Image (cartoon, rainbow, N blue to C red):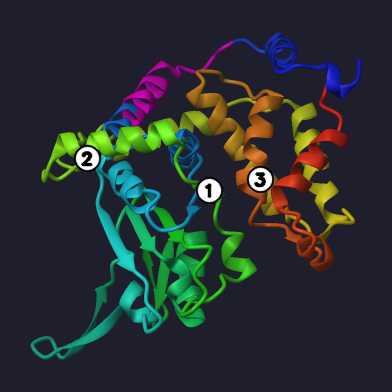
Amino acid sequence: MNEEQINPGEENHRFSNHFKSKLPLEALQQSMDRVQQELRKIIVGQEELMELLMVGLLSKGHILIEGVPGVAKTITSKIFAKTLKTQFSRIQCTPDLMPSDVLGTSVFDMNASRFEFRRGPIFSNIVLIDEINRSPAKTQSALFEVMEERQVTMEGKHYPMEFPFMVLATQNPIEQEGTYTLPEAQLDRFLFKINVDYPSFEEEVMILQGHLGRGHSDPLQGIQPMLSPDEIEEFQNLTSQVTVDKELLAYIASLVTKTRNHPHLFLGASPRASLAIMRASQGFAAISGRDFVIPEDVKKSLAPVLRHRIILAPEREMEGMNAEAVIAAIVKVVPVPR
């Protein structure tokens, strides 16, 4: 039987025979369903975006959301943050945004005769960095440490972030004036890059009907917080315990390794990408109520994990090829574990 003859149902059945459910995932699955229901009160369509936001939360990852203006990138992020019983802050990026505007700065206290560190807006739980590619390189580099190590170092002193900490960043792929391309090192710190497309005709009609029905009321008023920090920590710990078979670990490694010698790619994915695929696969399994990963979980993770970590060869880019096409080609040639 070759790869084309194996359907997802057969894969699921084959791998489900290896494991018995051991993790109590019912509460996790129900909570994620409730979060999704809250998002659907306002958001029409965008099913992939909502699912990846939840998987990102369970996988302790940061998310980059890319799309043209007006496709609900910011409002979806704000509603998602409101479904959590956590603090939320928003940073609007501009070309003159300085690192101190994000991280904070030391201010001299006249009464105490000493400098005190005043924390910036990055010190929150869910941080929305709007139009991140409008911030200059110096400010973008200031985010490296806090995204990777979840701490800020100022004047030799470490300031850890409170749990949970998640960055949601948005960017516009079309506008070029006044923007700065994110360096590869920063892109690699995002678990997912989600491409948000235009809604369908039917979805756009539903959007118009929803706005007409709400009138001038604030759409966020009806959103109820669903998850506490303790519940988030519990669900993240459960997700990390989801079983990944050795054959699937080899499958993930094979897929990522294939990007490093692919003729259509100038830059392949790093080992951080392999870890991201594994963690995301565990997240997809957990929200499906399974305590084991199947090949379909890995495949669902590939595009959002890899699309911002690989660079096309210049000649292929000029031909109109994109990262998703290369990823799909790699999936076809790497055998699925039997």
Q: Nearer the viewer, residue 191 or 48?
A: 48
Instruction: Report the Cα–Cα distance between label 2 and label 1.
Output: 25 Å
Mark sitting earlier along the chain (3/1): 1
Where residue 28 appears, x then y in whole percent? 40, 24
Amino acid identity at mark 2 = His
Position of residue 200 in the picture relative to residue 185 (left or right)? left
Mark sitting earlier along the chain (2/1): 1
Q: Give the residue number, with chain letter if any, for mark 2.
A: 211
Nearer the camera: disc 3 or disc 1: 1
Position of residue 316 in the picture relative to residue 57 (left or right)? right
The residue that appears at 85% across and 56% down in the rendered structure is 264
**Residue 171 seen from this side:** yes
Magenta stretch in the rendered image: 21-36
**Residue 241 seen from this side:** no
How many neighbours does mark 1 have within 10 angstroms: few (below 14), some (14-19), or many (20 or more)? many
Callout 2: SS? helix
